Amino acid sequence: MSETIAAAAQPILVFMFVLGGVAKLASVGSEAEPGALGRLGPAVLVPERFRSPAMIFCGLAEFGLAAGLVLFDHPIPRWMTVAFFAVSTYVLWDLRRRRPDVGCGCFGEVSARPVGLRSIGRTVVLTAMAVMIALHDTSGLPELSWTFAAWCGGGVLLLMILSPEIEESFARLRYRAPCEQRSFPAERAFSRLRSSAAWRTHYPSLRSEEPSDTWRELCWRFYAFDGADGSDVVFAVYLSGRRPPVRVAIVGADGRQAPLQESIHVSASH
Amino acid sequence: MAAAVLGRDPDPPRLTADDGVLLDAISGVILDVSPHLIIVETDDGDEERLVIAPWATAWRGGTATPADLPVGSRVIIRALRSGKVVDRIWADITRMTGIIRSVSGRTDLAVELDCGPHRGVRSIVIPYRSSGRVRVRYPKLEPGYLFDAIGVIRDDVPLAQVPATSQPAYRAGAVPPPPAAYGGVQSKISGTAVWSDFTDRGAAYAMLERSDSGCEDAGVSCAGLPYLALGSMLYVRNVCAGRATALPVVACGCMAGRFCDRCVECGTSPRGRIVELSATSYVELGGDLTKGCFNARVGLT
């Protein structure tokens, strides 16, 4: 049974590698606004001049691993795949903690939505698939059978559920404009904020239910509230998708931000 | 606050120049001027004494010698060496950007411009001697069309001297839609940066949410700009002069958003005005006020 799962996982991983590599290289080539590349994935964690090379390196590495899995019957490419996805999981987790506004960049421009638990869950599933392949030494082209097809379909379905890019692609087909250029009523964003977990967590510490200030920047709408202890509680609502990510920070009365770790931790845990 | 909640770097980058020569801009009124020294009362009320470089030139409706500028003129000075050496002076310069409301007169044309909800209505005069130069670029001097010219203020009357752009072929209410964007992220924002008369250091930006900015004409742009807020920091780069700085959005650029022109200062820029800078910020970035625009690239800090 587990051998069939590993055999079904292999074409999925190869397909994901090729798709990710092509999308990354395409988004490096597209003329993105200065800094837009920085909003795409872990490249934001390296200095600006290394961002394009980092994206290119990542894309080429994915092509290399895809070729390694298909062409070479050797444990090295298989365990390298495990290492790649394990490291990716950690990097995404760290990225979500350090830069809550950037997307995972896994599939280039489409992955501009901020990293959420779904993106991280997807890399965990891919890591598990890679481990299965490595443990069973799966290589070459798999034999086709109904159980193989069922596992393959199930894996694809699971990954699609865990992919926020699907929603973004549909939104793009519907609106034909990036989220930054779409008008979005403030009231609708506010109702989304009020139904979020971050709101429920911080609601008791607010002095008033009405925001003291609100403004929009790119794909985020910000709401500033007066906190009970004289600080400001700032929420940021992402303006795309049905259940958008909501971030929160507490800015002290002296104008200084509460320690980043503390404020981001609160939001990252919901 | 936005930086705090999204973990961005709260300190914006400062003014940079590829050639290493930083420019300063001083705006004020001339208290005294001699061939080598100019004394200016700045907008903050300080008195500044600047040395006039031997190569320095002035503009007041035409090229002039700095020493010939009258006391009491309102000047914008491009200065070198930490703002102590005058490189170029523009005296009594003004920019008239708006929608034509009415035109009257036979020789000197009196034009009434609607400069947007926050700037109000302005009456300007196109003197007979520059009307040919203006009309060749503005063949339809009729109500409803856009107008943009640079001129001088003489006796509190703005006189148009040179057209700042060619007249857009459409009426102000029929701005062409931005090019279709299919990208998930904002594509590179390149276009034209222009200047305007406002004195706050910063930029006016067209794509603001109407409910936030209190500007009912905001949100119109033919450059495909992303939504930003008053107070957002923009990273503006003058592609022609190789200078860049971070500037806050301080006003609604509803009038700039209606122009779909290109700047040909160095190469041909993509269509559309992306920012309208204050005159001092424009000069700091190496722009020439009499030319009216430079090719710019804008990003968020």
Image (cartoon, coloured by chain):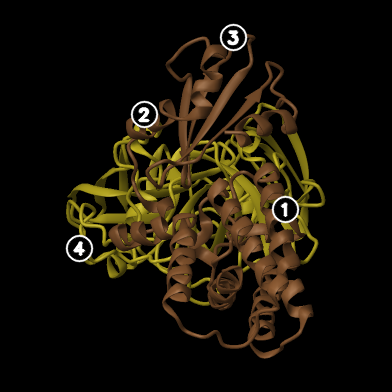
Task: Please state which of residues B33 and A232 is positioned toward the viewer in this rendering.
Answer: A232
- Residue B292 in the image: state x and y as whole percent: 48, 59
Lower sequence index among marks 3 and 2: 2
Which of A233/A144 is in front? Answer: A144
Q: CA distance from mark 4 to mark 2?
A: 48 Å
Q: Secondary structure at mark 4?
A: loop
Which label number is shown at residue A228? 3
Quadrant of the image for the N terminus of chain B? top right
User: Which residue is tagged 4?
Assistant: B140
Protein chain holding label 2: A
* Whether labels 1 and 4 share one chain: no
Horizontal side of residue A102 vs A45, given as left or right: left
Depth check: A171 or B300 in front? Answer: A171
Tag 2: residue type? Ser
Whether residues under marks 3 and 4 lie with C-beta atoms below 8 angstroms apart, the answer is no
* Same subunit, tags 3 and 4: no
Q: Position of residue A125 (x, y in %)?
A: 59, 58
> What shade does chain A have?
brown
Q: Earlier in the sequence, mark 3 or mark 1?
A: 1
Amino acid on which disc 4 is placed = Lys
Alpha-carbon distance for marks 3 and 1? 36 Å
| Coordinates of residue A170 in the picture (x, y in percent) | 34, 60
Of circles 1 and 2, which is in front? 1
Q: Colour of chain B?
A: yellow
Q: CA distance from mark 1 to mark 4?
A: 63 Å
Mark 1 closeness class: few <14, some 14–19, many ≥20 residues within 10 Å: some
Which element is circle 2 on? helix
Name the amino acid type tagged 3: Ala
Q: Identify the residue position indicated by label 1 in the image.
A: A90
